[in-house]
Amino acid sequence: MIEWLTIASVACALAAGLISVISGIRGNPPRDLTVLGTVSVAVVLVVILVVAIVQPLVGNPPGGDALEFWLYLVTALAMTIGVTLWALVDRTRFATIAMGVVSLAIAVMIVRMSIIWTGA
């Protein structure tokens, strides 16, 4: 993966996660800011998906286990989609906290995907 993309992706996921967790702890239901933060994490994951498809074609194949990388990516996408749908259906503060926890977990998953890609 591209290093600057990894840093930007982790920053986006951390920001969305912290905003959602703090908003949920304050007792707020899912709002535009928290839902759009989680959706932005999903968009970043789609960008990573496109980069992961293009990079091997231009001579930068994964150094680690490609299957493990793809499973991390598919799981992260499923988590963001699932928690966003949950937040749209269940308008409680627990959905807001769940969006934050998922975004924070995805930040860790993105770091792990970068490690897998580089083969370190």
Image (cartoon, rainbow, N blue to C red):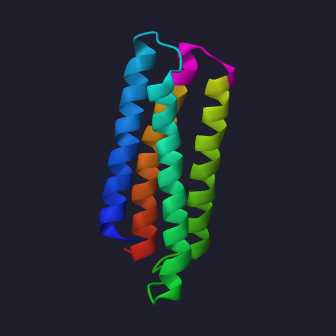
Percent position of residue 28, x then y: 47, 12
Q: Is residue 50 left or right of residue 7?
A: right
| Residue lying at 43% horizontally and 26% vertically, measured from the top left | 20
Give above or below for 3 relative to 85.
below
| Residue lying at 57% horizontally and 22% vertically, measured from the top left | 95
Q: Nearer the viewer, residue 48 or 76?
A: 48
| Residue lying at 62% horizontally and 61% vertically, measured from the top left | 71
Q: Is residue 15 left or right of residue 93?
A: left
Which of the image's four quarters has the C terminus?
A: bottom left
Quarter location, residue 110: bottom left
Q: What is the chief secondary structure element of the magenta stretch?
A: helix
Q: Nearer the viewer, residue 115 or 46?
A: 46
**92 inside magenta stretch:** yes
Give above or below for 80 relative to 87.
below
Give above or below for 101 relative to 55.
above
Q: Given the current orientation, which residue lies at the most extreme top position? A: 27
| Residue lying at 36% horizontally and 31% vertically, measured from the top left | 18
Percent position of residue 37, x then y: 45, 36
**31 inside magenta stretch:** no
Q: Given the current orientation, which residue lies at the most extreme right position? A: 89
Q: Given the current orientation, which residue lies at the most extreme bottom position? A: 59
Percent position of residue 48, x then y: 49, 63
Instruction: Count the numbered circles shown.
Output: 0
Percent position of residue 31, x then y: 50, 21
Which of the image's four quarters has the N terminus?
A: bottom left
Q: Give the magenta range.
A: 89-96
